[in-house]
Structures are given as C-alpha cells and as structure tokens.
Image: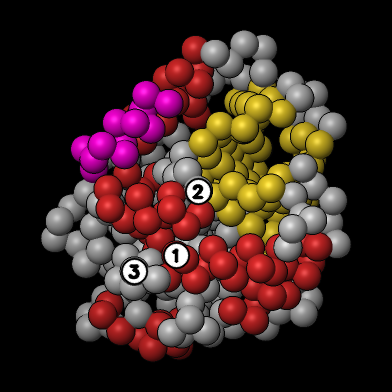
Amino acid sequence: MFTVLQISDTHLSARKPLFNANWDCAARTLSREAAALVVHTGDAALDGPDNEDALAFAAARIGRRLGPETPRLRCVPGNHDVGEGPDPALLQPTTDALVAAHVAALGPACWVEDMPGWRLIGINTQVLGTGLSAEAAQARMLAETLLTLGERRLALFLHKPPFLDEPDEDTESNWAVPPRDRVALAPLVGHPQLRLVASGHLHVQRLRRRGAVLHAWSPATSFIVGEAILPDTRGAERRLGLLRHRFRPDEVETDIVPLPEAEPILFDPIAAEVYPRSAAGALPKGHGRTAR
C-alpha cells in the first residue's frame, strides 16, 4: 500500500563532525528509495542538550541532504536531542525548553500521521515520567488518538523501545523505557490494532514478532556500539543501515537497507572523545549500563 523509511541516531554535529559523512551516505541511499514518509527515530544531533545550535545544525544537514523532492520527514526526539529523563541530578535532564528547541528545529516531538488504513504515531519517550507540560500534552494527544482511531491499524515510532524482551520485564535499563514510565504507553503497546513498534537508540538491528506486532530496532546511520558499551545485543546485529517498512492492509513487512558506502565506526574506543563529560567513571549518557 505504502512505504515508510526509518532512519535513526544520525548524531550530527558541526563541532564534532565524526559521523556527518555517514549521514551523507545514508541520504544518498534514501534518495534512491521510494517512500511516502521518512521517520527519524531520535538522536538527530550529537549533543543537543549542551549545544543550543546543535538541533538547528542537524535539521539543516538532514534537510539539505534529503532535498526538496524526497518524502516528508517526521522526527521524534532522542536523549541526545532533548535530554535523558526527569532526574535533575542527571547531566542532561529533559526540560520543556529542550523539547521546544526540538519542535523549532525538527517539528513536533509527538505527532500523528493518518495513511490509508493506518494511523502512525510518533512518541517522545524522553518526557515520560518527567511531569513536564510536554508530557501532559503528549498524554492528551495519545488519548485523543485512540478515541478517534476507528478501524485503522496502529504503528508506533519512538526513540527508546518500550521494553527489550518482554512487556512486563522489571529490569532498569537505559536502553529501554523504564518500567515505571512504561505504564503511560500500555494502552498503545497493548492495543489490539497495533502492528508495528519501530525504535532506535540501541544502534543495533533486530526484527522480532510478538503475535501480530512487529518490534523493529533500527540500526544507526552514525556508528556501531561494541561489546564494552552493549555487551548483550539480545540477538540483534551490530551494523549500520536504515529500515524500510512496507505497510499492507493488516501487517507491516520490514527489511534493512544497508549502507555499504558508510564507514563502520566503532564507538567504544572514541566514547571519551565524543562525550568527555561522561568519561570519568561512566559510560556515555544513554549508551551504557552506568549512563545514569
């Protein structure tokens, strides 16, 4: 019926352009694909919370490379765009101001797209549990979205997956939505008309079906995370690429689009160079077991 291309974790930066060339490779690949929509599932910028011009640079770089004749672009924020959760003790807590900066640069942080027979929803995982006005606004939008769903099938796009393996898992992990915040997503994740949950953040590629629902982890376009930061990939593959989602009447067929021209940069040995504030006794923010 129609195709959506998913890109994720571009980590673009003017100050540290380590991964910008890989985005150019991804953009060339995108230009050869036919799609109704492109969805970016977060971490467009390398370090948005600490650099006020980072999101604007990422938006300009993405828009310039995609060009005027490519499909429309929708984005949801990642932790390196708008911060990491509610705790003010964190190096980069999420704030309404950071979410507003994402809106100004890349469009709404949560959104709805109605396509033939389908409703696509973009969710800002970074405001869950924060108590911010952005979280309240998103909750109202999601409630209204389900009330007006009708017979459409559902597809969710978000930065962090709602869980790693099981919906009721109680293990705290920076790689997925924490259990205490997952409750807000339960009406969506457990909805009988849900068919796709598409996320980024982990920098690995995995497709796994749970009943009628395909859970798709998108690889990054920027870099590969190694064993020092992500010891257990849970069966996912460490690679660069993007995802192609083909929407049928009652299911989604997904496959990876590789990036053969991109450099498979391993992040682990350059983590301290990329995120020096996190180098002292901890792995980079949002990319490891001790990120908090």
Q: Which mark is residue 38?
A: none
The first of marks 2 and 1 along the sequence is: 1
Whether residue 149 is visible: yes
Q: Residue at x 81, y 36 (%)?
A: 2
Q: Which mark is residue 52?
A: 3
Residue 140 inside the magenta-drawn segment: yes
* 257 lies left or right of 74: right
| Residue that badge 1 annotates | 55
Instruction: Give the answer, above or below, for where 158 lies relative to 139.
Output: below
> Could you tell me residue 192's position as x and y percent?
58, 18
**Local crowd size for mark 2, using a 10 Å CA cut-off: few (<14), some (14–19), many (≥20):** some
The first of marks 3 and 2 along the sequence is: 3
Element type at mark 2: loop
Give the quadrant of the C terminus: bottom left
Residue 186 inside the magenta-drawn segment: no
> Could you tell me residue 57's position as x and y percent?
49, 71
Three-letter residue code for mark 3: Glu
Q: Quadrant of residue 254?
A: top right
* 44 lies left or right of 66: left
* Span colored in magenta: 130-141
Q: Which mark is residue 107?
A: 2
Q: Residue at x 34, y 69 (%)?
A: 52
Magenta residues, dominant SS class: helix
Viewer-closest of 255 and 94: 94
The answer for how far apart the CA atoms under marks 2 and 1 are is 11 Å
Instruction: Give the answer, above or below, for where 85 lies relative to 272.
Output: above
